[in-house]
Image (cartoon, rainbow, N blue to C red):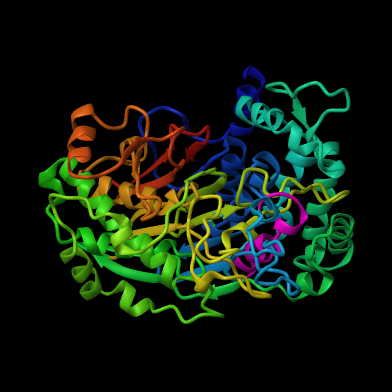
Amino acid sequence: MKIYILFLIIILQSALVFGASRDPIKAKNGMVVSADPLATLAGLKILQQGGNAVDAAVAVGFALAVTYPQAGNIGGGGFMNIRFSDGKNYTIDYREKSPKSATQNMYLDSAGNYISDKSKFGYLAAGVPGAVAGMLLGLEKYGTLSREKVLQSAIQYAEKGFPLHYNLASYINSEKEIFEKFPSSKKIYIKKNGEPFLEDELFIQSDLAATLKRIVKNGRDGFYKGKTADLIVEEMNRGGGLISHDDLKSYKAKIRTAVTNKYRDYEIISLAPPSSGGTALIQLLNIVEGYNLKSMGHNSSQYIHRLTEAMRRVYSDRAEYLGDPDFVNVPLKWLLSKEYATERRNSIDTLRATPSQQIRNGVQPLQETTQTTHYSVVDKWGNCVSVTTTLNGGFGNYVVVDDAGFLLNNEMDDFSAKPGEPNMFGLIGGFANAIEPGKRMLSSMTPTIVLKNGKPFLVIGTPGGATIITTVFQIILNTTEFGMNIQEAIDAPRIHAQWLPDILLYEKNGLAVDVVNNLKSMGHTVVERKGTSGSAEGIMFDHKKGIIFGATDSRGYGAAVGY
Ligand code: GLY
């Protein structure tokens, strides 16, 4: 740990405020918050060099691909939500797509049974990566600095190495058995002598550095054409994967219109489909807007009952209606309307749980990994960027592209491989999210910006699979209803429910025993979850005092740094 901290201090040099304390970090000019301290510092450096929030966000994104390989990526995808201080808002969708040769039944055996491992591990699990196209689109359209400047830290971390954080070293070691299966991954993630990686050990990724340099030199063509594309296709050919040169060449990131809505005095700006995140978040807020939540008290049984009832209804809609808008007609206007929320709220019995079976049929177990990652950035001009990106599961499909040094995603698991069957997050999908060639799989990522009186109030997001939406929802309520500061709002214990399975999950020690008992007596199946729920990275503003507050989640090992 000492070397890791020393490394941070050396790089920090000119940063005025840095911290992992439990108070929010305060700054006047700009703030970067991400799940990895070195990636946060890459963003800060760009802000201090005069770059804007988009430049810094792209620097963080590429740095995470090096220093946080469990979720940071160039082999995955994500969503970027940008709000400029002049009021203009842009969202970029760089979600992966299914390869053109993908078929609806590709994960079913001849008897029609779903072979779930096929969509989770190895070659067939990979969608066509969108991260490089999306980040470069953001940089070219809305950034101000060169690729060379913005990727400099990422290249340095890859080429010269960085000291492994204890958590990352342990995580890599714990997955040894799976990395063993793929020779290209073994080369990077298992040491030649078979010994475990140690905390503070220098982790050098020369192949990845070369790939990043090709991106600097040739832009998106440095990834989607030429040597990198050849290496991806060769890797696919070795393992029976589907991604072709044509899939790579034709991949395009898209600028989408954000979903927006009012919640009391606040304006919510979030991601439209193919993420379900913004839509579901707004639906949840619309439903609970009709209650006096504050009077119930934070995490009281009455409060949690209402949140849970809203969640089960919204996740049932998610399963039915949401998918890639380029392929299916998503009834967004109706889903986001206050009228529909009122109808949904009126169906809630304030004293009893509604069994999810009565809302729609289906039962399955919930398994969840949380390896997505979020970062939030604000610059001295007041521009805000909120980005969530993922490989899906931790280390994606576990396949490193040989000689290119990066992991591919297992995002195909976010499709409904067999409508009605759960994915790795226990989420059920309907036909709206069935596999089709060249389609984007439905996401839950919810990079969000909240305004108050037309000015930024909150920049927020989190990993957590299905829990992403409910985590962002509760953090927004913690700040807007209960007056928590950003650190308190992020650290507060969270619950999660998602229609099916019909259970209410809470974090260890997150609810008092009498609250759990009250909820049980109302008919809820209340379960203490294994592990924690999400790992949020947020920024909050006090415009009167001219202070920007940053906070990283105590559940992770990230950093908020401002100046
Ligand atoms: N793979 C997680 C998500 O996109 O929601």
State how many labels appear.
0
Q: Position of residue 60 (x, y in %)?
A: 60, 48
Residue shown at 55% from the left, 47% from the top: 373
Q: Nearer the viewer, residue 425 or 83?
A: 425
Can you tell which quarter of the image residue 145 is in?
Answer: bottom right
Vertical placement of 28 versus 90: above or below? above
Q: Residue at x 87, y 22 (%)?
A: 193
**Residue 50 can be seen in this image:** no
Q: Is residue 107 left or right of residue 373?
A: right
- In front of the other: 458 or 112: 112
Q: Position of residue 56 (x, y in %)?
A: 57, 53
**Left or right of 435: which side holds 304?**
left
Residue 138 lies within the magenta run: yes
* Left or right, 18 with reference to 343: right
| Image coords of residue 411 (percent x, y) | 63, 58
Residue toward you, 30 or 463: 463
- Report ligand 1 position as a quadrant: bottom right
Q: Quadrant of residue 2?
A: top right
- Where, quadrant-wise, is the N terminus in this rendering? top right
Query: Is residue 341 inside the magenta stretch?
Result: no
Residue depicted at 39% across the width and 44% down the height: 28
Q: In the rendered structure, which segment of residues is drawn in magenta?
A: 120-140
Residue 41 place in picture, x, y as percent? 59, 40
Res 169 visible:
yes
Residue 492: image quadrant is top left
